[in-house]
Amino acid sequence: MGDKNDKARSSPPSEDADDKQKESVAEKVPAALGEALRGAGIDPGDPKVSKAIEISLMLFSGPLPLPPPHLWEAWERTHPGVTEKIVEWTDRQSKHRQFLERLRAERSENRLDRAQFIAASVAIGGLCLSAVVGILGSPVVASIIAIVSVGGPTAATAFVAWRNGKAPSKLPTRKPPST
């Protein structure tokens, strides 16, 4: 029996061994990826291709956005302290991104507050102006100024439509963008 095992070890691999290796490699490759590779003229059973696929799948199988643990260990062996640096960089980047998001939200709120203040100032100024115009003897103009200063563009659009004899439902409307 020992002679057969020695002979099998010393003889070159047969076609059956190559086929078995290709089959085991092909099992590691997802079916959809294998079909896509074959469609591109690449043999997924080729050991070099399968090794590249295996490495790629290994890289993307970890808890994103961080690499899988076995890569951390390999990096730490080759570059001691690199894992702590990567974690620190990731933490700093996360804090920086959160700071920018918070800043953007605060600035947006400030813009909205400023717009409301300006709109209120315009409305109060328009009401004061309409009161002065009304006291000076032109109540129609005063009422138009009051409507426009409080209602703004919506009131102006309704007034123009009324003056032209169109009902507000017949006014042109903007269509929402098609998706």
Image: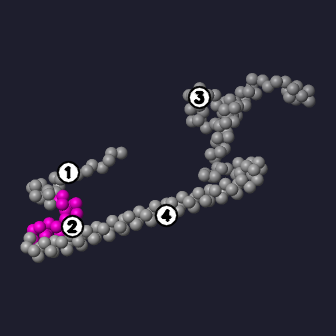
Q: Which residues are magenta?
A: 139-158
Instruction: Give the residue pinned by disc 3.
Output: 38
Instruction: Give the residue pinned by disc 2.
Output: 149
Labels 1 and 4: the sequence-earlier one: 4
Instruction: Give the residue pinned by disc 1.
Output: 172
Q: Main secondary structure of the magenta part?
A: helix
Labels 4 and 2: the sequence-earlier one: 4
Residue at 49% from the left image edge and 60% from the top image edge: 101
Q: Secondary structure at mark 3?
A: helix
Using residue 5 as the reference point, say whether residue 69 is left or right of it: left
Between 175 and 100, the residue placed more toward the observer is 100
Looking at the image, do the residues carrying marks 1 and 3 touch, with CB atoms under 8 Å apart? no
Estimate how packed mark 2 is, as few (under 14), some (14 to 19) or many (20 or more) residues with alpha carbons within 10 Å: many
Which quadrant does the N terminus fall into? Answer: top right
Residue 5 image position (x, y, % from top left): 88, 29
Disc 1 from disc 3: Cα separation:
56 Å
Which amino acid lies under the numbered mark 3 shown in the image of this protein? Arg
Q: Nearer the viewer, mark 4 or mark 2?
A: 2
Which amino acid lies under the numbered mark 4 shown in the image of this protein? Arg
Tell me the number on the disc at residue 102: 4
Dividing the picture into quadrants, the one containing residue 10 is top right
Q: Is residue 28 above or below residue 83?
A: above
Q: Nearer the viewer, mark 1 or mark 4?
A: 4
Residue 167 image position (x, y, % from top left): 13, 56
Which amino acid lies under the numbered mark 2 shown in the image of this protein? Ser
Labels 1 and 3: the sequence-earlier one: 3
Disc 1 from disc 4: Cα separation:
39 Å
